[in-house]
Image: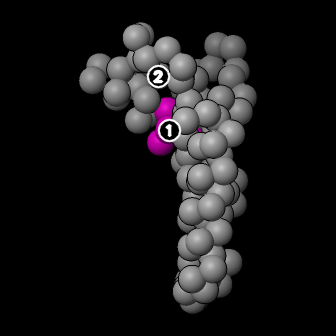
């Protein structure tokens, strides 16, 4: 699946959930919404499944932090050089599977 296909698929999911029109009074959107995050990798030889999931999860949390009801591609998250603890940018993670 290409990056564009992943984005379009995620957008369709969000629109499908919106079209259900489920009320959520505790949400600022007043209705049920969804957020999605993904990371597309062309060469999996050096990527662990854990790193792939962690970076997609980081993208998901960035979508939620940005106001929810959004799709975020991990590769669009700004990378900050020398990002220390508490930095607002995420860096690709290489974690054991």
Boundaries of the magenta span: 55-59
In terms of depth relative to the viewer, which is nearer, 62 or 3?
3
Q: Say which mark, if any, is on residue 93.
A: 2
Q: Say which mark, if any, is on residue 56.
A: 1
Residue at the location (49% across, 32% down)? 55
Dominant secondary structure, magenta: helix
Q: Residues within 10 Å of mark 1 (few under 14, many from 20)?
A: many
At mark 1, the secondary structure is: helix
Residue 58 in magenta stretch:
yes
Residue 52 in the figure: left or right of residue 37: left
- 94 w.r.t. 37: above or below: above
Residue at the location (43% across, 17% down)? 44
Instruction: Please tell me which of labels 2 and 1 falls first in the chain.
Output: 1
Q: Say which mark, if any, is on residue 32.
A: none
At mark 2, the secondary structure is: loop
Residue at the location (41% across, 35% down)? 53
Residue 41 picture location, percent across and down: 53, 23
Quadrant where the C terminus sits is top left
Residue 66 picture location, percent across and down: 69, 53
In terms of depth relative to the viewer, which is nearer, 79 or 97?
97
Residue at the location (69% across, 14% down)? 81
- Colour mapping: one colour
């Amino acid at each position: 699946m290409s990056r564009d296909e992943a984005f379009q698929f995620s957008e369709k999911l969000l629109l499908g959930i919106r079209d259900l029109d489920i009320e959520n009074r505790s949400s600022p959107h007043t209705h049920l919404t969804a957020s999605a995050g993904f990371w597309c990798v062309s060469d999996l030889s050096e990527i662990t499944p854990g790193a792939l999931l962690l970076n997609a999860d980081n993208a998901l949390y960035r979508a939620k932090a940005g106001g929810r009801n959004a799709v975020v591609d991990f590769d669009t998250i700004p990378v900050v050089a020398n990002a220390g603890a508490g930095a607002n940018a995420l860096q690709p993670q290489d974690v054991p599977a």
